[in-house]
Amino acid sequence: MRRDGLRGQVSHSTVDRCAVSGDGQGPLQVNGIRWQLDPEVTIGRAIVAAAQRLGGAGVDSPRLDAEVLLGHVLGMTRAQLYAHADRRLSEEERRRFEALVGRRCLHEPVAYLVGRKAFYGLDLLVTPHVLIPRPETELLVDLALDTLAHRSRSASGNGAQPQATLADVGTGSGAVALAVAANNPHVQILATDISAAALEVAQENARRLGLEDRVRFLRGHLLEPLPQPVDLIVANLPYVAESEWPSLAPDIANYEPALALAGGPDGLSLIRDLLAQAPRYLLPGGSLFLEIGSGQGAAVARLASAAFPSAYVEVLTDYAYHDRVVAVRT
Ligand SMILES: C[S@@+](CC[C@H](N)C(=O)[O-])C[C@H]1O[C@@H](n2cnc3c(N)ncnc32)[C@H](O)[C@@H]1O
């Protein structure tokens, strides 16, 4: 399947080549045939067999997924799986692996199956209550860190050590807020989300990373929960338009929270609301970075210029040359 843009919108040019059924808990059925591994199966053979099944179910990266899932069951890295390719699986290991492969064949994302996702070098917990952090969102982190470093260089010329404040709006797993906090010891972060369940995950990630003193999580609509204006606002808000829903990959549409994806009729409802609020919450000289969908650059730049008439507004693209961030520097 062809991935197209951050949220993995796909064209359905590849039709699933085999019918997969099952509730994901018991043995998998492929084309009506019960799929079970040989009781004597080794690590190496289990990976090959699972990769064939996953490929047949239309999964994008079957071999990698099989290795990650088996590594999760066995508590091994991928390198360790290769080093112990001839080791036999116990019955319990085999059954757990079969169940995970079954769920993956139904397109449940690997990150939810193993409960974690790497983002900007951090190992984050993820549950179905939060969007799985995407590599493209690391651009937001880079922009925030560069802006903070620039501020710090300018201020140290005046002999001051600035204590910058940043708001991460729609924090989800806490990915952006925690990546910025982990890489800049001087920033204080306020991270908001409308979802209490997402904030629990974010809070737990902050605790595990030892960052809870510098990231405060607040529940509410966009910037409304903020107690004071900030120097920097970053946001990866839902931006999938209603017309795009039918082309979303099943991994996304059937498993990731709609609250994290749906941006209203044109995808821009929340971005519009945020830009209406932002002038009240951004300190003079502050910056705002908004992640957007490919093709939304011109529309969001227009909205941003209307909200901040004297600001420098630009659309930045990702490595695939898709519109990815609108940057507003006041
Ligand atoms: C696309 S996800 C981004 C999550 C995370 N920042 C990331 O990049 O992985 C959008 C997040 O916005 C949150 N959200 C949706 N509507 C919101 C609102 N009105 N106010 C605050 N957060 C909202 C969702 O719950 C979700 O966690």
Image: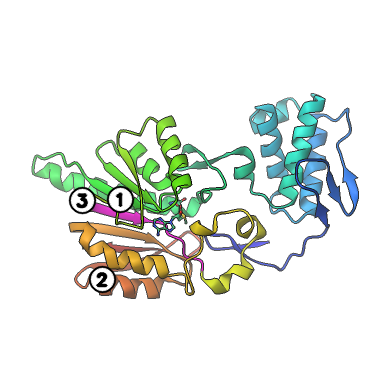
Instruction: Judge left or right: residue 135 versus residue 192.
Output: right
Residue at label 1? 167
Residue 18: image quadrant is bottom right
The residue drawn where x is 77% and y is 47% is 23
Query: CB of mark 3 within 8 Å of CB of mark 1?
Result: no
Residue 228: x and y, percent?
A: 20, 51
Is residue 228 in the magenta section? no
Residue type pointed to by label 1: Ala
Disc 2 to disc 3, how far (Cα)? 19 Å
Disc 3 to disc 1, how far (Cα)? 10 Å
Q: Find the residue positioned furthest to the left.
A: 158
SS for tag 1? strand
Instruction: Tell me the number on the disc at residue 228.
Output: 3
Residue 311: x and y, percent?
A: 22, 68
Residue type pointed to by label 3: Gln
N-term-proximal mark, 3 vs 1: 1
Residue 72 drawn above or below residue 289: above
SS for tag 3? loop
SS for tag 2? helix
Magenta-colored span: 231-240
Residue 217: x and y, percent?
A: 35, 43
Q: Which quarter of the rendering shows the N terminus?
A: bottom right
Can residue 224 be seen?
A: yes
Instruction: Tell me the number on the disc at residue 307.
Output: 2
The residue drawn where x is 9% and y is 39% is 159
Disc 1 to disc 2, how far (Cα)? 18 Å
N-term-proximal mark, 2 vs 3: 3
